[in-house]
Image: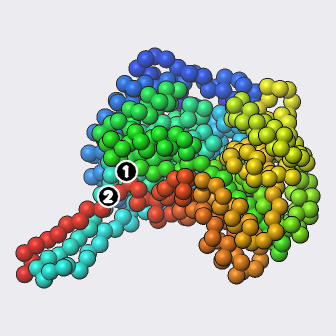
Amino acid sequence: MNLSHPSLFQTNAFINGAFKASESGNTFEVANPFNKDILAQVANSTKADTEEAIQAASNAFQVWKKFTASKRSRILKNWYHLQLKHADDLAQILTLEQGKPLAEAKGEIKYGASFVEWFAEEARRIYGDTIPGHQADKRIVTIKQPVGVVAAITPWNFPSAMITRKVAPALAAGCTVVIKPSELTPLSALALAQLSIEAGFPPGVINILPTINAVEVGQTMTNSKLVRKLSFTGSTKVGKLLMRQCADTVKKISMELGGNAPFIVFDDADMDEAVSGAIAAKYRNAGQTCICANRIFVQSSVYDEFTEKFAKAVKEQKVGNGLEEGTIVGPMIEEKAVQSVEAVLEDAQTKGADIITGGKRVGNNDSLIYEPTVVKNVNTDMLVFKNEIFGPVAPIFKFDTEEEVVKMANDTNYGLASYFYGRDYARIWRVAEALEFGMVGINTGMISTTVAPFGGVKESGFGREGSKYGIDDYVEIKYMCWGGVS
């Protein structure tokens, strides 16, 4: 690893403003998914480390919440500028531990930093209200106050941006944070911790706990009375478990969970644009995003045209080492992720589906690089319809009518992202309103942006990240009634 700022490569937990070994002294390996090389031995945080971090965050909260909004904003801006200054190093670390192409990693660093910039500015705009009183001698005022210590559990697919998207609004509101990054990608989180020192955050405001003891650390967070808010991005199964664990202490929670995004192509769509949008929505990060197009629905009259153009474009996607220039699709994160993709494809083929292109690993049987794959002759009985694929596999379904495709698109427990292409504006409004998803991309396959609220409905979770709404989950509204005003 050749970094211009070598201090960004950290392997110990970050507690109370300092990097320290685990209380147990144990470590775990972090490997490059492309070649399986061991990148680092990282401190394996325990319950005791978690309790120490939570206490540090609680102590720091008494200081941080009293900072003026302007002062918090300035420190957040420092952090933002440092992330941009060291974007190349941060991207290299990200690609090495996660696998995504370097250009995509740099895009994530800039995307993640944009949340820090946005919420640095929003820190100055956490307004309360005055409300007309219900009696002549009463005055009513509301203020917004930080909720307290926030626990954040983040995934491996966006190891930098998923942290900043949660942490930036929390810090802007005056909260302090304890973060458990994925055990597969802790190095990006620890690099952000190093930059937080340089940005000027007081000790204990940000704490990071790398660990393979996810259950132990997670339960310590959810059981703690000092932790007043939990923000989680991950699977619906784990999200439900965490919700149950938070019930005893009645924490404020927000959940960004699984997805099963439909991508609809109507007969009046611009086919070339629809193909480009589908490529972007499906194969980014090797299909390992919660908002990836999971089920592609194409109207019968244009099915053959779209499928032919799409398959041709998919074959042109360069796969390989994320550090090599021109790579578009890198390795998947781990062996069980590849096995999951193989299982859904085997199910589809058993039930009559045909693979148009792809359908196998690149290289040897141990490779984590899976060919971008397109499947046709699929139906709603297959796992490719029911499950979140989370890999570079695109099943293409055929439909005839608007009513039929809306019903098919909504036939899922999930409701995170959705996409469709078409030009009939009346139909655009009808379909956009009818889709039971928190986000709808219309004639675009790229919808993530700092300025818009990110989040889902149904079993995809609740709460919103980004935009002016993103800070709401980190504040409490206090109502003050003033009597005797006469």
Q: Residue at x 49, y 23 (%)?
A: 44
Front one among 434 and 205: 434
Front one among 210 and 287: 287
Q: What type is the residue that disc 1 sits on? A: Lys
Q: Secondary structure at mark 2?
A: strand
Q: Tell me: 16 left or right of 344.
A: left
Q: Position of residue 189 (x, y in %)?
A: 53, 38
Q: Residues at badges 2 and 1 in contact (C-beta under 8 Å)? A: yes
User: Which comes sooner in the sequence, label 2 or label 1?
Assistant: 1
Front one among 53 and 233: 233
Q: Position of residue 106 (x, y in %)?
A: 67, 47
- Mark 1, Cα crowd under 10 Å, few <14 / some 14-19 / many 20+, is some
Q: Tell me: 404 left or right of 254.
A: right
Quarter holding the N terminus is top right
The label shown at residue 360 is none
- Residue on which the image places disc 2: 476
Q: Position of residue 112 (x, y in %)?
A: 57, 51
Q: Is 248 rendered above or below residue 270? A: above
Q: Position of residue 336 (x, y in %)?
A: 69, 31
Q: What type is the residue that disc 2 sits on? A: Glu
Quarter holding the C terminus is bottom left
Q: Residue at x 39, y 26 (%)?
A: 47
- Residue on which the image places disc 1: 252
Q: Residue at x 32, y 54 (%)?
A: 146
